Amino acid sequence: MAYLDFIDPGNSGGSVPPTDSPFQGLTPRVITYSCTICGCQFDTPDAQFEHRFENHPSRRPALLLKGIEIITPHQLVGSQLSDGDVVFGHVTKCHLNNRSITKDELVKYLVEKKCGLCTIHLENEGIKTSYQLDFDVPDEDELKEVERIFFETVGGGILDSTRIDLFIDMTGRFGSAKRYVHGLSNYLYGVLAKDQRGGTHLKRLDFTTKFNQALDTLRLFDKSFAHAIAGVVNFNHNVFGGAERLVATPKAYWAMRKFGGFVTGTIIDNNDWKLDASTSCSKIPLDYATEKIFEWALAPFDELLKVRKELEHTLKLADWVYTDKFKVRMLLAELLVASGDFSAATLIAGSSSNDIVFGPWGQRIIRGEGVMYAKTE
């Protein structure tokens, strides 16, 4: 029986003379490792690895459209590109649909394309990235008609599922704008779900899904109306950046700036809040809580102080979602600091002091450093 720890050389009895090995006298070949970029050779893979990353740091080729790097293999392009919208990073070679092409030729192709798929391969020093772009650029006139019909059907009166269905039916003939209609409709369904009204069959918490679907679609459209809806959705999610894109809707713009100021500790002149906030967003349907928070956020100190009890009562309501209650807590805590009731403000904001995003705000409230009604020089 053979064992793995013993190998019979075939000459244990000594009766068979040993033969010379056919490899006797040959010098073993030394294995070398070459750099794929400059050709330098190394004795060990570790030496090759060290050389590669010290002398040839990798630079992954990148494609940016409208300032955003494409990081997924499949990307929808939903708006017209211009020359300045297409930017390459660390690219030495380009291929379009398996055909070699220059960067300038690729830019020209992408700017002119309006529909259909294309496959792009970018290369830099042996490193490759691949993208499949799906173009679905709508007709601008159709987008304008969709917006007109939106305000005509759901921009006034009581929002319900019948009005949303009418909006969808009236815009069905605009084939290139179907994504736009889909995004706006999801927003409207989200409003109904959040308020549990208008004949909706959705549950209250389904509003988050509908709002996210709307946001995911509307981000493809560089239009002020799409920015306004996206801003309302972000506000619902307590994301208070990008106020500069909401200038067409002053109420949303100033409310976003105010809450953004809470987060960053930025003091904004009280007089700013007097700009025509009362007439803005009047034709974009809002859920009840967002409408109230806009109203409170833009109220002068004396007026907000009068509704302190209402703010406190809101925190106890079961039909207000957590993100909205948190905004009310921010308003109330800032109001209490401005009125000198520091202990009550600390009770409201103290639990946020360790939050990743809102921790600095909570800590400022605890220190009695509110910004809502701070004096400016």
Image (cartoon, rainbow, N blue to C red):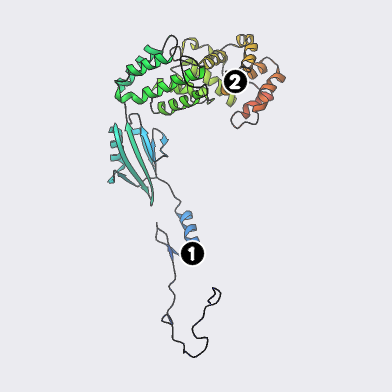
Instruction: Tell me the distance, in whole angstroms, between the alpha carbons under discs 2 and 1.
Output: 62 Å
Which residue is nearer to you in this view: 251 or 350?
350
* In this rendering, position of residue 24 left or right of residue 349: left
Which residue is nearer to you in this view: 102 or 287?
287
Pointers 2 and 1 in contact (CB under 8 A)?
no
| Disc ID at residue 325 | 2
Up the image or down, 330 lies above or below 301; here it is: below
Q: Position of residue 47 (x, y in %)?
A: 49, 61
Disc 1 element: loop
Three-letter code for the amino acid on which mark 1 is drawn: Thr
Q: Is residue 374 visible?
A: no
Q: Position of residue 240 (x, y in %)?
A: 53, 24
* Residue that carries the numbered disc 1 in the rendered image: 44
The residue at 47%/66% (across/down) is 43
Three-letter code for the amino acid on which mark 2 is drawn: Lys
Q: Position of residue 16 (x, y in %)?
A: 47, 89
Up the image or down, 270 lies above or below 222; here it is: above
Disc 2 element: helix
The residue at 33%/24% (across/down) is 177
Which residue is nearer to you in this view: 311 or 162?
162
Up the image or down, 97 lies above or below 216; here it is: below
Up the image or down, 338 lies above or below 99; here it is: above
Q: Where is residue 70, by image quadrant? A: top left
